[in-house]
Image (cartoon, rainbow, N blue to C red):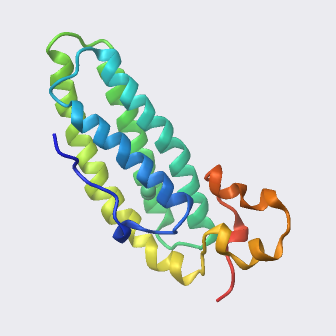
Amino acid sequence: MKNLISWDDRLTIDGDAIDADHKHIIEIINRFLAKVGDFQSAEELVAILEDLQGAAHDHFRREEELQRIIKYPDRDIHFTEHQRLSAKLEKLIEESRPTGGSYVNVMGHKVSDFIHEWLFSHILKSDMKMKPFVKRAGIKPVAKSANAAKNDNPNDNKNISDNSLSEKRIISA
Ligand SMILES: [Fe+2]
Ligand SMILES: [Fe+2]
């Protein structure tokens, strides 16, 4: 199956950790979609869903932290959406575990509906609503921030490699 979505610059939110997370999540989604209808075992399906669960867990935490920093007005609604997506994914994983034979692929299609909802209702709608607020707050990638330029500490740029968020990223406009 063709990739459902490819990363493109219009999806940029912060030019940093959040974008890196979304790229990673999209890569897992595309890996999943390439296998829909062709899963050979429940383990194969569950392994991809657990990758997605791990990536989502870290990503939701980072996104919620960014929203707190920029005082994003809809963060309660957004948090509830994250909770709902996490709970639904957990349920789908538990439902997938005992499947076997052709039922794995019935389950795969069910998961596919959920993935579409996640991508189109959450990432492309709810997450993108954050973009003007991130811009207004003056969020810049760590490597390009004034703080990073002023700081000689080579560890200052580790925020990029470990994808963590830092309040240092906020510089006044
Ligand atoms: Fe997100
Ligand atoms: Fe989100």
Give x and y (percent) for residue 138: 60, 81
Is residue 156 positioned above or below 129 on the image? Answer: above
Q: Nearer the viewer, residue 58 or 77?
A: 58
Q: Is residue 78 above or below residue 149?
A: above
Furthest residue toward bottom: 173
Vertically, is 138 above or below 151? Answer: below
Return the x and y of residue 63 as percentages of the image width and height.
53, 58
Say above or below: 84 vs 142. Answer: above
**Quadrant position of residue 159:** bottom right
Q: Nearer the viewer, residue 127 or 5?
A: 5
Q: What's the residue at 60%, 73% (across, down)?
A: 70
Residue 161 point in image, percent of width and height: 64, 52
What is the tally of numbered marks visible in this picture? 0
Most distant residue in the right direction: 152
Q: Quadrant of residue 110?
A: top left
In the shown orientation, is residue 91 left or right of residue 154? left
Q: Nearer the viewer, residue 161 or 130?
A: 161
Which residue is at 25% across, 34% downward? Answer: 111
Q: In the rendered image, which quarter is residue 150 located in?
A: bottom right
In the image: residue 7, left or right of residue 53: left
Residue at 61% in and 66% down: 68
- Asked whether, in this view, residue 149 is left or right of residue 15, the answer is right
| Quadrant of the rendering where the N terminus is positioned | top left
Tell whether 80 sits left or right of 70: left
Q: Residue at x 28, y 57 (%)?
A: 121
